[in-house]
Image (cartoon, grey):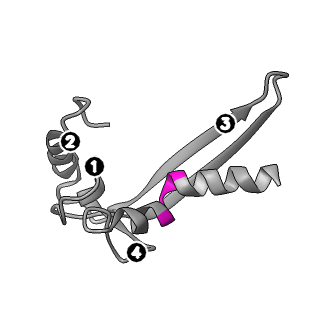
Amino acid sequence: YCGKPGDDPANRRTLLQHLAGKTDRSAHFACAIALVYPDGTEILAEGKTHGYVLTKEDGDGGFGYDPLFYSDDLQKSFGVATAEEKNGVSHRFRALQALREKLV
């Protein structure tokens, strides 16, 4: 979204600049996953995790936008959440769960 791949601090600063003065800071992470069999059969799934963008960084854990994303599920930022907490509510985890349900 913001710019240079691999420059998370700069990208977070850019996001905060773009949202300066905004009152609606609702946000979500989304993940789409596709399983394609050799015969062309496709199974698609999506997962989302909801929250909002903080006005300043909270924590230094995770990567990317984690210190700015406040998770509705965890009631804390992904920047202070443990890997286990984050993985339990992440968009990737939910996409994989949704895919698994389609396979059963």
Q: Is residue 104 left or right of residue 95?
A: right
Q: What residue is rendered at 45% in x and 73% in y?
A: 73
Q: Are marks 2 and 1 in contact (CB under 8 Å)?
A: yes
- SS at badge 3: strand
**Image coords of residue 14 (percent x, y):** 18, 43
Position of residue 40 relative to residue 64, above or below, is above
Position of residue 89 relative to residue 73, above or below, is above
Label 4 or label 2, whichever comes before in sequence order: 2
Label 3 or label 2, whichever comes before in sequence order: 2
Residue tagged by mark 4? 74
Label 3 or label 1, whichever comes before in sequence order: 3
How far is disc 2 from disc 1 in space, using C-alphas?
7 Å
What is the span of residues highlighted in magenta in the rendered image?
88-92
Residue tagged by mark 3? 34
**Image coords of residue 20 (percent x, y):** 17, 55
Q: Nearer the viewer, residue 53 or 97?
A: 97
